[in-house]
Each structure stands twice: as C-alpha cells, then as structure tokens.
Amino acid sequence: MMRQEQGVDTETRQSELVAPVAGTSEVPREHFHLLVGILFMLVGALWLLPLGSSLWLDETGTFWIVQGGLGQTIHRALESSGSIPYFVVVWLFKTIGGSSEVVLRLPSIISMGVATYLLYRLGKRLFDREAGILAAIVFVASGWIVFEAGDARPYAMALMALIASFYFLVRWLDEGRPLDAVLYIAASALTVATQYLIALALLAGIPYALQRRGRTTRVTTKHLVLAWSAIAILAFPVLPNLISLWKEKASHASVADATPGTVVHFLFPSVVVVSVAIAYLAGRWFGPFRVKVQPAAPSTGWLLGAWFVVSPVILFLVTFVSVQLVWVRYFLPSVAAASLIVGWALRSISPYRLRQIAVVAFALISIVELISLRHVSRAEGFGRDDWRDAAATERRVVESASTPVLVRPGFVESNDISLFSNPETRSQLLSPLAAYPMKGNIIPMPSEFSPRASRYLREVVAREGLEQSNQILLVTTNSTADSIRAWLDATLGPHGFTSREAGTFDGLVLIEFTRGSSG
C-alpha cells in the first residue's frame, strides 16, 4: 500500500510540473510573478552592473558634445549627429548630477526601461499579458539591447520613441481617441529627431494602418493623412542636417559589419532555440509538449512583419546602390519586432510549466553569455575601449608635459588629416581626452594606417623633432598597434629608441618608446 501511495505521489508531482491548475485554462498568479522577477533580474544583472565602466570611443563623443553650456551642446549636436533631444537630456543630467559614467548613461537606461514597458503593453494589446511579458524578457536580454541600454548615445531614446509610436498608433486605431493620435505624432517626430536610421522603421505603420482602415477601426483615411502630414512637418527641421550628412556620407561610411547570416543571428539568437529545446526535452520527460498557437488579428501580422523587415531591406538597398550603411546597430527596430514575435511563439508552448522552464533557461544562458563583459560592450568588439585606464596609465608613465604622445582614437573622420588643423574638429576627434585627460604633448593620428598616414607620420617626426626626445608614447587600438609600432621602430630605432608595451586596456594598447644610453 505504501509503495502504491508513493507511486501516486510521484505521478502527481510529475503532472503538477506540466499541468496548470485543474479545471481552469488560466495560469496561476505565481507564474506571472516568476516572469516579472526574471525580467527584473535580467535588467539588474545585464543592464546595471557595468554602468560604472569607462566610456568607450563613441561615448566620449557624447561627453565632448555636452561638456559646455546648453548653446554649445545644441551647436555641437547639430554639427555631429543632430540628435538634439537626446543631447539636451544628457546635458541636463550632466548639469544636475555631474559627468560620471553612470550619470551620462542614465538617459539611455531610463529610455530603454520605458521602451521595455511599452513593448510589454504593446504585446499585451496585440496578444495577451503573458505574451507581452515574454516579449519584454527576450527584449531586455538581447545582446544589442543590453549594449544600448548602457550606451551613452541616442539609440535607446530613439528605440523608446519608435516603440511608443507603434503603441499609440495601435491604440489610436483600436479606440479612436484623438489623444492617442497626438501621442503617435509626437513619438514619431521624436524618433526622427533622435536618430534618422532608426526612424526608417516608422514606415511599417503605413501598411498596418491602411490594412485596418475601414475594417477594424473608426479612423479614416483623412485622419491618417493628417497625422502623417503632421509628422512630416514636425520632422522637416531635421532635413538640412540630414542632407548635409548625406553629402558627407563617404566620410561616415565604413566596412559593413552585417551580412544576411549575421542579421539572422542578431535578430533570432541561438539562445532562444536552445531554451525551447530544453523545454521540449522537459516535456518529453515529464509530460506532453504541445504547441497551441495563440490567436492574433491578421493586421498584427502586417504590423510585425513590416516592422521586422523594413529597416534591413532599406539599409541593404541603400548599401547596394550608394554607401555602406549596413551596421547591425541600425537593425535595432527589428529586434523589438522579433522580441514580440518570439514572445508570441513562447506563449504558444503548453503547458505553462514548460514556458517557465524555457524562460528560466533563456535567462540563465543569457546571463552566462553576457555578464562576463566587464565593460558596457558587445562581444563583437563595440565599446571595448577602456580610455579611463589608458589615460591614467599615460599620466603615470609620461615623464613631462612636453613628451610627445601619439593618440589614435579611431574615428573614421580622422582619416581627413586636414581636420587636425581646425581646433574645433581636432578637439572632437580627440574627444576621449576631453573625458579622460592625458598629460603629454598630444599628437592626433588618423584612423587608418595608410600610405597617407605614413607620410603624415614622417611630417610629424620632422616637425616635432621626435628623434631628439627621450620618450615617446603611442596610444592606439589593438588592430593597428603592430603596424604603427613596426613603422616607428624602423624610423626611431637608428636613433637609439627601443619600444615596450606599457599596458593594454581591452581594445587599446599603450606603447612606450625610450632612447637608450647610446642614443
């Protein structure tokens, strides 16, 4: 009798693992508590822990823009990226809280937090509450979202505005309230004003709205045209800056870091597939693994499909016919759409205990994969420049303020050597030193070590009298350190110089050249 009762208990425990509460199709409240807890755990582990790390190259550009007054901030923002709303907000945070790395990154953290909440609300409206939470979990643990959440640049704010635009568009079409139309227009205009290429995804709202017009909404074609006209009018002030950037597109373009294969991996990371496979194996072991597709309106497919493909398609087409713009970071809008799609797919796994297993596996694997990044950075190399430690070591190693220090920050624009003669552009190209000052006599270096760069170095050697110095320092990225060091060794070696590596700082290296006793 005792064995039989134990057997029943074992079967009961196994059934409880995969079965919802008996007699109801609803999952218990504790299931949602678990999902929300996982969401906040991921935010804390992946977004917040690295916030105090050194600013990387592009973030030091943000520091350079906001280091002065509000007027200077707006002027420099217009001259660089044009993201006026973002830089004004960062300037306000800096004015109130100081210039620490954490303060400069707070606008991005807050923006991405709001974006996550709006994505949840959108998923809840398009599908149901659980699908919205699952989409938010996938979103916060996506590698580039983790990166941009703590990146002191405009992308998080632009993504927040974009998701807000889609959310208010859907709510306007659902309920027909004028306030939602106003919020849709404002969010769309903010997206354009914050980041032009992120704003390309706004086009996905057009087929969605037209598909619903006259069928499932009281909003008429006239209302839609008025809204889109208002967005165009509000976006018009950014047109001159956009035209200027397009004319100078060659100086901003670089080798693409995205191919169709990397884009697929970027949008649908393998960790999702592994997590579902774990849930499937658990279902095979403890009970049935079922897929019950959650119903959705046909228009939802139009919205998510267009949202998912519009940015990649446009960017690949522009790259094919004109200039290289296929950087993975510009596919961030598609990450939001993919998160909603994956959240809906995870919601279709049944019973709910298997969804819990999949989400827990996803969270643990994501943390193991990403938490090892000590700095706010991506494994592909973005953001791995530790300028803070590099500058601190330079100040410790350098012998005097007259010691020549060759600095190669790596901005693509620095290949135009003529920009070094303009004090404003020179300071912008050396923006890491605005955030983390160095002690020596700074000599800027071009981004690429090309024949033109070699000629420039010869001029520097002659003009600065480097052969007469007792010490020379070189601060550069790992990618060019060997070639520049070899050139300097060959040039300075006959004058008695030897070189040594004085320190490495993630993606940066500091090399010291000193004159021997026979020099």
Image (tube, grey):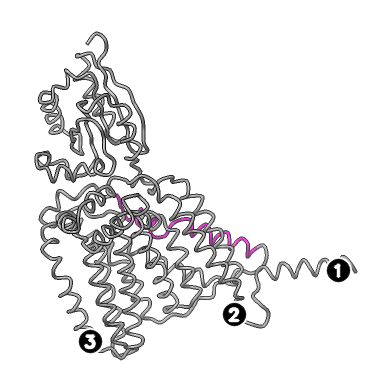
Based on the picture, tell me whether residue 276 belongs to the magenta stretch: yes
Q: Are marks 2 and 1 in contact (CB under 8 Å)?
A: no
Query: Image quadrant of residue 440?
Result: top left
Quadrant of the rendering where the N terminus is positioned: bottom right
Quickly name the residue at label 3: 223
Residue 247: image location, x then y, percent: 10, 56
- Quarter in which the C terminus is drawn: top left
Distance from label 3 to label 2 (Cα)?
39 Å
CA neighbours of label 3 inside 10 A, class few (<14), some (14 to 19), many (20+): few
- The magenta region covers 257-284
Residue at 58% in and 59% down: 278
Cα distance between the residues tagged 1 and 3? 69 Å
Question: Which residue in the protein does label 1 denote?
Answer: 4
Frontmost of labels 2 and 1 is: 2
N-terminal of the pair, mark 3 or mark 2, is 2
**Image location of residue 442, percent across then percent down:** 20, 33
15 or 185, which is in the foreground?
185
Asked which secondary structure carries label 1, the reply is helix
Residue that lies at the very extreme toward the right in this rendered image: 1
Residue 142 left/right relative to 436: right
Magenta-drawn stretch contains 1: no
Mark number, residue 26 = 2
The circle on residue 434 is none
Amino acid bearing label 1: Gln
Amino acid type at circle 2 is Glu
242 versus 372 height, above or below? below
Instruction: Classify residue 386 by image quadrant.
Output: top left
Q: How many residues crowd mark 1 within 10 Å: few (<14), some (14–19), many (20+)?
A: few
The amino acid type, in three-letter code, at marker 3 is His
Mark 1 vs mark 3: give the one in front. 3
Which of pointers 2 and 1 lies earlier in the amino acid sequence?
A: 1
